[in-house]
Amino acid sequence: SSHFGSTRSIELSFQLRGSCWLLLLIIEFPARPGYSPLLDMSSCSGWSAMDGVDTDYVARADVVLVFPCKPSPMVRGAGDVHITREVSGLRPPTDSERHRMEAWQIKRRCTMAALSEAGLIVMPFYSRSGDKVFVKAAADEQLLSQVAETSKHKLELKSQYLSGFAEYKSDYVGRRELNYSDRRMCSHLYKVHSEHEDGVHTDEEKDPENARLRSRPLVPPSIFRTSDRIRLIDHIVRSVDHDCAGIDIGQLVRDGELLDYFPLHETRKLTA
């Protein structure tokens, strides 16, 4: 699960969608000293660490893109602004290294801008060594529903419908002039998935006294499984369809502008 401030998230969402230039100012804000994304890869605490956002709202990230930031951990880069020159032990980049870092930064910013324009929530933060930038991508339920319907993605049905799979269709209240005869209600057909499935025990079940203090908020139940979310976000990232990012992941990897692209595990299942 991941964290994102409810009040601030609306403000940032407007800024990310409304101005690409303002987006570039926000996403490159440096992380706090000593923070490592490898310690908690499936939470979005990287964003709160970068911008001081509150952590009341859960924004679940399902996909990660790893970008190069500097050619070596020993080279001073944009992620090392919090380290003083006297204790850093980092050397200034050469001209060729600086040009390469600038080219990486431009491509990284353009890619993140495309993801944001497609409606995804992007949460970037530096690795501990500062030579990589991890970008988590998350999508809200509304965006997932829109993409599932346009891409004709099939979702699991309830057990009374033999747990089959059918293309997702949104509810349609119908037209008044037709006396709502064209009304279509399909939301009750799809199975709702939660973190309590598959025998996974939550912190409340294991230790109810201390669970509230150490556990993160539960991800709300959803008709989208983890595999559904990953496939739909991957479609948004790669597809050239309308309102998708159209990013060529393979070309970025071949050009050395993207180091990795992978889905995230579910934290609660890993710790069960």
Image (spheres, rainbow, N blue to C red):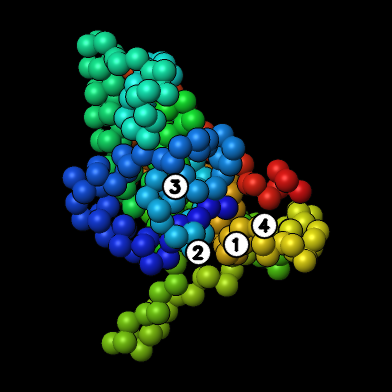
Q: Amino acid at mark 3?
A: Ala
State the residue at coordinates (76%, 54%).
200
Give how far apart the Cα atoms at labels 4 and 2 are: 14 Å
Q: How far across and how far down the image is residue 267, in percent?
A: 64, 47
CB under 8 Å between discs 1 and 2:
yes
* Residue at which label 1 appears: 217
Q: Amino acid at mark 4?
A: Arg
* Residue at which label 3 appears: 49
Of labels 4 and 2, the one closer to you:
4
Name the N-terminal-most of marks 3 and 4: 3
Q: Nearer the viewer, residue 239 or 123?
A: 123
* Residue at which label 2 appears: 56
Of labels 3 and 2, the one closer to you:
3
Report whether 223 appears left or right of 135: right
State the residue at coordinates (76%, 48%).
272
Name the N-terminal-most of marks 3 and 2: 3
Any mark on residue 214, and which?
A: 4
